[in-house]
Amino acid sequence: MHCRCTSNLKRFWELESDIQLPKEKLFTDEEKFCEHHFETNTRRESDGRYIVRLPLKVEVPQVTSSRDIAENRLKSLERKLEKDKTLRVKYQEVIDEYLKLNHMELISTEEIDNPKAIYLPHHAVVRDDKETTKVRIVYDASCKGKNNMSLNDQLAIGPTLQPELRHIIMRWRSASICMSADIVKMYRQVKTDNRDNDFQRILWRENPNSEIKHYKLTRVTFGTASAPYLAVKALQQVAHDDGADYPMAAERILKSFYVDDFLSGFENVKQGYEILTQMNELLGKAKFKLK
């Protein structure tokens, strides 16, 4: 009994110590590469949005026959969508939104035959628990070409930058009043450099009788191995770059986000309004938006 109590007490103090005094993270060589790569290659547009490079482990990634594989996967997807007309409509709506928001660009005829281009198969993920965005398109950057390599095989993943979820929740629960939100289309608020966008091509057509069109994705892309790191790093970077005038928001951006989910709290309504105002203004400088 004494041993069990001592063990539990030790675990409690370790957990408490973790929350109050987070340990300095030790990065692997690949994680150090990602950090240096982000620092040296990231820039901002005039409106404040971040533009990132893909952290490639090779100078030019190669996925042989990716276009043929993507076309076969597209035809398989079309057969599935023909059996579910509602999903077909929703899928097309997502594609249309990508085009409307300039998150994807049509490739001209002259640019199609680029030997360095990599095509990503894609499919739908349906989330019935979501009130909005129930259908999400995920891009299969793990699909291997005939050389047995995928885009993800050639991307560095990057370190985990955010606190553990248990620590975030414990801090969140300790506040008198809780606040929660998430960032609208977080990944897609970060642009990818045009030099890398041909590694994020897709095929699509409105119906199986139409001509297949070629597109390239221009934002951090669901399904790529580096996407979580790039999106979170850009989110935290705005706290470092512009956070001096928004100290309450900057601290929470670094400590109270789990991917795109924000969990924080405050002691009174006045403080809550101040935190919310600072969060909206600071995040807005990088085109992130809370909902």
Image (cartoon, rainbow, N blue to C red):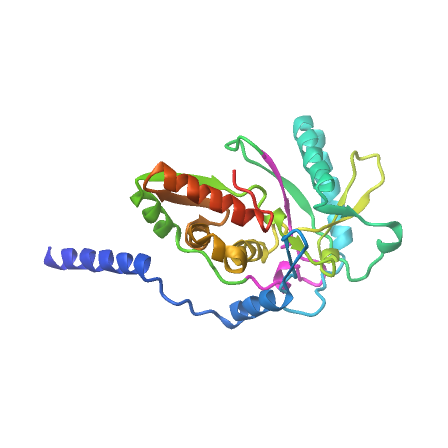
Position of residue 58 in the picture relative to residue 111 (left or right): left
Residue 127 placement (x, y as % from top left): 54, 35
- Main secondary structure of the magenta stretch: loop
**Residue ID at (54%, 67%):** 35
Classify residue 7 by image quadrant.
bottom left
Classify residue 88 by image quadrant.
top right
Classify residue 93 by image quadrant.
top right
**Residue ID at (61%, 54%):** 224
Residue 4 placement (x, y as % from top left): 16, 56
Q: Is residue 146 magenta?
A: yes
Residue lying furthest top in this view?
86
**Residue ID at (35%, 50%):** 166
Q: What segment is highlighted magenta in the picture? A: 133-157
Tally of marks: 0
Residue lying furthest right in this view?
110
Which sits in the foreground, 90 or 282? 282
Residue 167 placement (x, y as % from top left): 35, 52
Which sits in the foreground, 266 or 86? 266
Please determine whether, in this image, residue 52 is positioned above or below residue 131.
Answer: below
Q: Is residue 90 magenta?
A: no
Residue lying furthest bottom in this view?
29
Image quadrant occupied by the N terminus: bottom left
Please determine whether, in this image, residue 114 is positioned above or below residue 179.
Answer: below
Residue 138 placement (x, y as % from top left): 62, 45
Which sits in the foreground, 144 or 184? 184
